[in-house]
Amino acid sequence: MKDDPGAPGRTERVEAIPRKSIYRLSIYHRCLQRLRDNGVETVSSEALARAAGVKPPQLRKDLAYFGQFGTRGLGYSVSHLARVLNDVLGTNRLQPVILIGVGNLGTALLRYGGFNKEGFEIIAAFDADVQRPRPGLPAIPLKPIEELGPFIQEHHVKMAILAVPAMAAQQVVNQLVVAGLQAILNFSPTILDTPENIVVSNVDLAVELENLSYFIR
């Protein structure tokens, strides 16, 4: 799918747009999916912003990075804007993803059935101990960690989910960087040292729970 007229190319967008805006695009996209599933054809910026939990000016500013999509007095076409965001986020086709670390958390992630629906396909998993029994594991190739680099290069994988113990995380990440990986979703409870061109999103469940506990009285 071609970019809309006047919209910057993907490389330019990645460099110029705040990461928080990109994050909010995913939220807008899910709101649009729900509206489309409910048969809603158009939505105002106010209604979409309210559904996404942001202010309307923030919504309009985020979308303006990619062009002008609304019609004054009518709002946004739900189906068109969903397609645009689908293209912007790169989820208009299945993105190959690998998972590294098939312990309890990694196994749970492999069993999750929602990745494909959102445009991501876990095509292989890697672990230091592939012989350990893992009942109920989906039919995804489980490979030894030694095959990580060659597999990434052979299958042109750009994204990985990291769920290894903290002590092993940096060593694995070094292999990912050498192999040409570009993005990491990190579930390991440690800060990774990566080059500037590698995008890392950290998911620390303990920190998230600690944050929530602040609001419990």
Image (tube, rainbow, N blue to C red):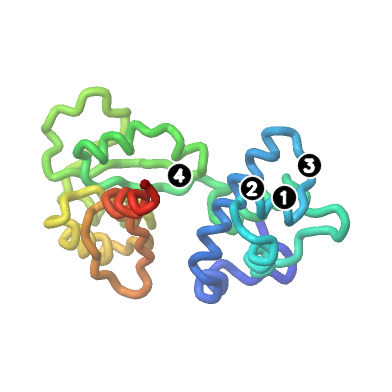
Examine the rendered structure and indicate whether residue 146 appears above or below residue 195.
Answer: above
Please identify, in this view, whether the residue under mark 2 or under mark 4 is nearer the observer. Answer: 2
Say what secondary structure mark 4 lies in: strand
Give the residue pinned by disc 1: 47
Image position, residue 188 (x, y; %)? 23, 53
**Residue 51 bears which disc, if any?**
2
Q: CA distance from mark 1 to mark 2?
A: 6 Å
**Residue 120 bears which disc, if any?**
4
Figure quadrant of residue 172: bottom left
Say what secondary structure mark 1 lies in: helix
Q: Earlier in the sequence, mark 4 or mark 1?
A: 1
Examine the rendered structure and indicate whether residue 143 appears above or below residue 17.
Answer: above
Image position, residue 59 (x, y; %)? 65, 61
Amino acid beneath label 2: Ala
Residue at 54% across / 76% down in the picture? 16
Q: Horizontal placement of 154 versus 11: left or right?
A: left
Say what secondary structure mark 3 lies in: loop
Q: Quadrant of the N terminus?
A: bottom right
- Of residue 181 and residue 50, the one placed in the foreground of this image is 50
Q: Horizontal placement of 132 versus 138: left or right?
A: left
Amino acid beneath label 1: Ala
Give the residue pinned by disc 3: 41
Image position, residue 159 (x, y; %)? 37, 55
Say what secondary structure mark 2 lies in: helix
Residue 166 seen:
yes
Q: Earlier in the sequence, mark 2 or mark 4?
A: 2
